[in-house]
Image (cartoon, rainbow, N blue to C red):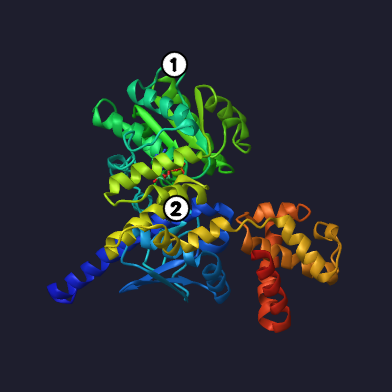
Amino acid sequence: MTGGLEGYDEVAEANAQKSILDIHWSRICARLKAEVGEVEYNTWLRQMGVGPVDEDEITLYLPTRFLRDWVRGQYGDRLGALWHAEIPAIRRVELQVARGPSPAADGDASAAESGASSAATPPAMPVMDAVVVEEPRAAEVRSDLAAPLDPRFTFDTFVVGKPNEFAYACARRVAERPSSPGFNPLFLYGGVGLGKTHLMHAIGSELVREGRVSVAYMSAEKFMYRFIAAIRSQSTMEFKEQLRSVDVLMIDDLQFLIGKDNTQEEFFHTFNALVDAGRQIVVSADKSPSDLSGLEDRLRTRLGCGMVADIHATTFELRISILEAKATASGVEVPAKVLEFLAHKITSNVRELEGALNRLIAHANLFGRPVTLETTQDVLHDILKANNRRVTIEEIQRKVAEHWNIRLTDMSSARRSTVVARPRQVAMFLSKQLTSRSLPEIGRKFGNRDHTTVIYAVRRVMELMEQDPAFAEDVELLRRMLES
Ligand code: ADP
Ligand code: MG
């Protein structure tokens, strides 16, 4: 450092600020990924980078104008909401085209070689993980075998209802008596945002609190990065030993290991060694063991050998209970009418429900005004709109086919003449814009086409809309008709 102490302080301060933003950003990325799915995330969002904060606005970078426009249209509001939830002072997101350093978010450990991720480079994984991969020296890996447990995710803060009572009971049981026969492994599964991670952290915190056993919690993704880092630094033996020395190993989001054969193999061996030694394993995934196609059979079989507990989609009653608990904890008075309204409107998952309530609470705190039904509708208008829109792909196909006067069956036919291919592309484009379906799902509805065909269609339609105002107007008209 040549600039003397003062210069150093500035640099240090800038670095501190950057790393704080990185932590928020990595949480937001993880959340987005969970919400939109891997394919979608990798297609549109992975290359985004964080820029500076200026008063109430944060700048995000995307490498091309196309991506910038698309992300702005599709995810702009959501990005704003997520940033606001992380840092309430941020109220706006500015998306700019800029080519930062090559993104670290490749899902590839080689990214770690470039050293600490720069502010314009989104981390591929939570920052904690990145730190470990960057410096794969055995001592450090050892000192930080587990990801930290979130102190908010305890059994006390978990609201129990019909959809999750079984999973909750199993989790409690494992926390009380790890490695009991019949409960090892404990396999928790269910959709996004329904409380799997919360329950795993709760088990961990409970055990750590009692100081009884050593617990290691990590995402399957982190497991993979650790493993790759160990191979690179030729310390796989240490890695294995460390893992095999814990009393309770928890791996979150196991579906991530699908298609990652070497990591799966390593996990399988770790798993066997631990269970044979009478240690507890807890695993979560988005599907049941038998539905996790793509996992090796022998691993699947072993995963299903202990206790398998699913968390079902929330019911109205559970949503109300969760909202009540969270509102009470916040100290802000939220009228029962508003809670009912939210529980009716936001049915997707607890994470979204929580996000909506947090925003209301932040708003009330910021402006010191009471929460009412009117302010709720106003403050949450983007979330409510997204939850209102229930256009189906079939409807879109029908309307588009009518508009260009082609047969509905041509939406899924193999015919490739422009007369039918163009409307088909428009229908794919609108399906992407107006429904929450993933790219592969959309592809399937259009005669089992691949998701790359859908991406191509979306790009093509956007290009054409730029070149041909009449065409753009047609598409806009269709969109408005479908939305109303
Ligand atoms: P998953 O891992 O299943 O995707 P999470 O455990 O991350 O979901 O839950 C998403 C958010 O919703 C977390 O903030 C969590 O605390 C909250 N949450 C989920 N279920 C409940 C519940 N039953 N009671 C209280 N909070 C919950
Ligand atoms: Mg989770």
The quarter of the rendered structure image containing the C terminus is bottom right
Q: Is residue 173 visible?
A: yes
Alpha carbon separation for disc pair 2 and 1? 34 Å
Quadrant assignment, res 206: top left
Q: Residues within 10 Å of mark 2 (few under 14, many from 20)?
A: some
The kind of secondary structure element at disc 2 is helix
Q: Residue at x 45, y 38 (%)?
A: 318
Instruction: Specify whether 98 is left or right of 90.
Output: right
Answer with the quarter of the image where residue 471 lies: bottom right
Instruction: Estimate the x, y position of residue 147 in percent, counting from the top left.
Output: 34, 43
54 over 217 or under it: above or below: below
Q: Quadrant of ligand 2?
A: top left
* Residue in the foreground of this view, choosing between 226 and 379: 379
The residue that label 1 is drawn on is: 181
Question: Residue 36: horizontal and vertical position, in percent?
Answer: 54, 54
Query: Residue 30 got which mark?
Result: 2
Of 152 and 414, the residue lying toward us:
152
Residue 115 visible to an observer of this rendering: no
Q: Looking at the image, is mark 2 or mark 1 earlier in the sequence?
A: 2
Q: Nearer the viewer, residue 130 or 467?
A: 467
Residue 191 horizontal/vertical position (percent): 53, 41
Counting from the top left corner in percent of width and height, residue 300 is at 57, 30
> Taking 390 as reference, is 31 left or right?
left
* Numbered tag placed on residue 396 in the rendering: none
Above or below: residue 403 compared with residue 276: below
Residue type at mark 1?
Pro
Residue at x 51% of width, y 35% of height = 189
Q: Quadrant of the N terminus?
A: bottom left
* Kind of residue indicated by mark 2: Ala
Category of crowding for the residue at label 1, using alpha-carbon neighbours closer than 10 angstroms: few (below 14), some (14–19), many (at least 20): few
Assess whether mark 1 and mark 2 are in contact (beta carbons under 8 angstroms): no
